[in-house]
Amino acid sequence: MLLIAGLTIGWFWGGHQAQVKATNLTNKLFAQVKPVREPAGTYQFISPILTYDVPAATEFGRLQTIQSKLADAVNKNLGAKNADKISVYFRNFNSGNWVGVDENDTYTPASLFKVPVMMAYFHLAESVPEIGYKQLKFIQATLPSVQIVKPTESLVTGQTYAVGELVRRMVIYSDNDATNLLLNNLPSDDLTRIFTDLGIKLPATTTSQDFVSVKTYANFFRILYGSTYLSRKSSEDVLRLLSQTEFKEGIVKPLPASLVVAHKFGEFGLLENGQITSREFHDCGIVYYPAHPYLLCVMTKGSDLTKLEQAVQDVSQAAYQQVNSRFGGK
């Protein structure tokens, strides 16, 4: 009888201790959940929440397999010298769980910068609807750069374009001339505010190149998908444009053609003494897997653009395979 009582007490005490431990872990993790709000002073009576920062899913014991597979894809490409540095952010939109690989390392956003430019114009259009019809004249092309992925359609010198058409070209063709024309006609505060709202500190000088992490940049797509910054119509229109991006050599390439992907890529070449000393290639977007959409952002740094594209493709394939194995046919 004493033995049975002892076993019962031991079982109860062990179970109690495990429950206490789990509760403490849960409390610790939830203490790390923090809202991302618009800066104080924007409004007098409200404090809008843009999104939430939460711990990585692996701290909850979730998404461990996909995190492992993403890390394998990263290490494979680092080992093959396809890249010097790779960072990844993956988020399951249905559960809100996310995982990353070196997600806090910083990079030069390059053409990823065009997403907040587009958002700034859509934000402006919500209070000034006619802005989309404003006509801007294209005077001259951008100075030669180290851009490899050229737009398939270019602006014609001397021709006038509506702002809405320039936004379309900036996103779909990643046209730098359209971007510069839009930037030159956008009040700087309108653009700066988007970065400030998300807690992104823009560099004080043009010599500061790497300033955005893949985890931070992913917030642009999070607030678009959740429509917590722009109106629902504007958020829908922005993501629709991003789904028409012509470039397919990044996260899109290994995916089935039937999948819709709203994404933006960026490439950057660091020019020193007339020589390209390093390159960066990034791709970030929402993969609309049926009933289970996910966000994937990959940033890379190396010397060969083709190899960097391959690294991004491998990471995208690993993410898709994990999602498909879990939800395929459901």
Image (cartoon, helix red, strand yellow):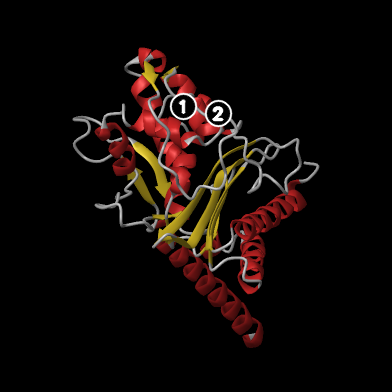
Q: Quadrant of the C terminus?
A: top right
Q: Quadrant of residue 291?
A: top right
C-beta proximity under 8 Å, tags 2 and 1? yes
Which residue bears the numbered disc 1? 167
Q: Is residue 108 left or right of residue 265?
A: left
Residue 228 showing in the rendered view:
no
Q: Residue at x 22, y 31 (%)?
A: 43
Q: Nearer the viewer, residue 205 or 12?
A: 205
Disc marking residue 41: none
Q: Is residue 140 left or right of residue 42?
A: right
Across and down, in percent, residue 233 comes to 48, 21
| CA distance for labels 2 and 1 | 9 Å
Q: Residue at x 74, y 46 (%)?
A: 327
Q: Residues within 10 Å of mark 2 (few under 14, many from 20)?
A: some
Amino acid type at circle 2 is Leu
> In this picture, is 275 found above or below 137?
below
Residue 222 showing in the rendered view:
yes
Q: Quadrant of the N terminus?
A: bottom right
Local secondary structure at mark 2: helix
**Residue found at the far bottom of this picture:** 3
Which residue bears the numbered disc 2? 241
Q: Residue at x 63, y 62 (%)?
A: 70
Across and down, in percent, residue 98 comes to 54, 54
Q: Nearer the viewer, residue 305 or 311?
A: 305
Amino acid type at circle 1 is Val
